[in-house]
Amino acid sequence: MVDYPEFTLAAIQAAPVYLDREASTEKACHLIEQAAQMGADFAAFSETWLPGYPFFHPYPVLSPLWDQAVAAYLASGVEIPSPTTNRRCEAARQAGIDVAIGPVELDARTRGTVYCTLLFIGREGKILGRHRKLKPTLAERMLWGEGDGVGLTVYKRNYGRISGLSCGEHTMLLPAYALMAQGTQIHVAAWPFTRHISDSSPVNGLLMSRAFAAQGSCFVVAIGSLLRPDDVPEPHRELVRARDSGNGEGGSCIIAPGGKVIATAPANDETILTATVTLEAVLQH
């Protein structure tokens, strides 16, 4: 008789401290510890969680406040490796948990380009690898550099094989194929905000995440962040417009192989959503 060990997946649905790398890092470390205390083996954060998705990017350019936000965003970028990533690695090691988190990665050479990166950290306290978003979406191209296929990698852990893509990459066939061809079993679908993980969203993140689970015969952790005025430091709060809010319908969720949603978080709450699963479901599909 085959034994299928249980493991627990966690979607960390929370707001960072926008434009504040140090405060966001401290909060991330606390959330990693909290997820581990809830029994999680693998925990995922949203797209560019550290130090936050560029909530200001649809704002009209050529304004002093927009220029200040862009400068603050670049100044808050995260080099890989760096003391910032070292702190998260140590948090993962102490908690004994694997982590996927989206940092705004700063190019160490030019220090003028940042990338939408998904960083994988092992429970050993070491970086497993990183993936830079291949093609930023629409206005994101004003802020993020283009990535490459080097990070299209599946990482083998003791409970299964993990992978991840950011937001609009889930509409691209070849990146998904590259990960499925490597046998991914647990996939992170990192979205900007919880409202993107719904059928009514223009990007239809829920449909895309469920499709990946069905096509790849794998679990999918679809995760989005929150955006509230109090999460953003002054003077940039006025750039948080109603349509950019993380509130609304949707919510982070965990999806089983085949596409069935097995756990959903309330769209407007900071919470850690968990689901305990086995690889039997992967093999059945």
Image (tube, helix red, strand yellow):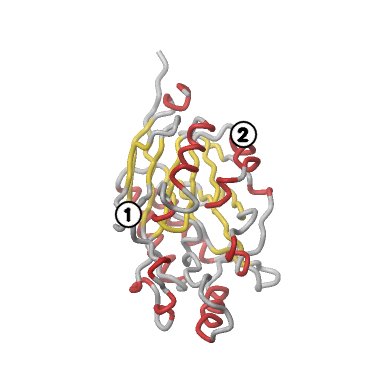
163 w.r.t. 247: above or below: above
Residue 142, quarter of picture: bottom right
**Rendered location of residue 40, percent (x, y):** 36, 43
In the depicted view, which residue is nearer to us: 140 or 256?
A: 140
Secondary structure under tag 2 reads: loop
Return the residue found at the far bottom: 64
Image location of residue 203, percent across then percent down: 50, 51
Q: Disc 1 residue type? A: Ala
Identify the mark nearer the N-term, 1 or 2. 2
Q: Is residue 89 left or right of residue 269?
A: right
Residue identifier under label 1: 267
Residue 143 in picture, x, y percent from top left: 60, 69
Q: Considering only vertical position in the picture, is 173 above or below 77?
A: above
Measuring from the top left, give residue 256's x and y in whole percent: 41, 33
Question: Which residue was labeled with disc 2?
Answer: 182
Q: Secondary structure at mark 1?
A: loop
Return the residue nearer the eye: 98 or 133. 133
Total residue callouts: 2
Q: Quadrant of residue 80?
A: bottom right
Q: Which residue is at 44% across, 65% downward?
A: 25
Crowding at mark 2 (Cα within 10 Å: few <14, some 14-19, many 20+): some
Is residue 89 visible to us here? no
Amino acid type for the residue under numbered disc 2: Gln
At 39% across and 41% down in the image, what residue appears?
254
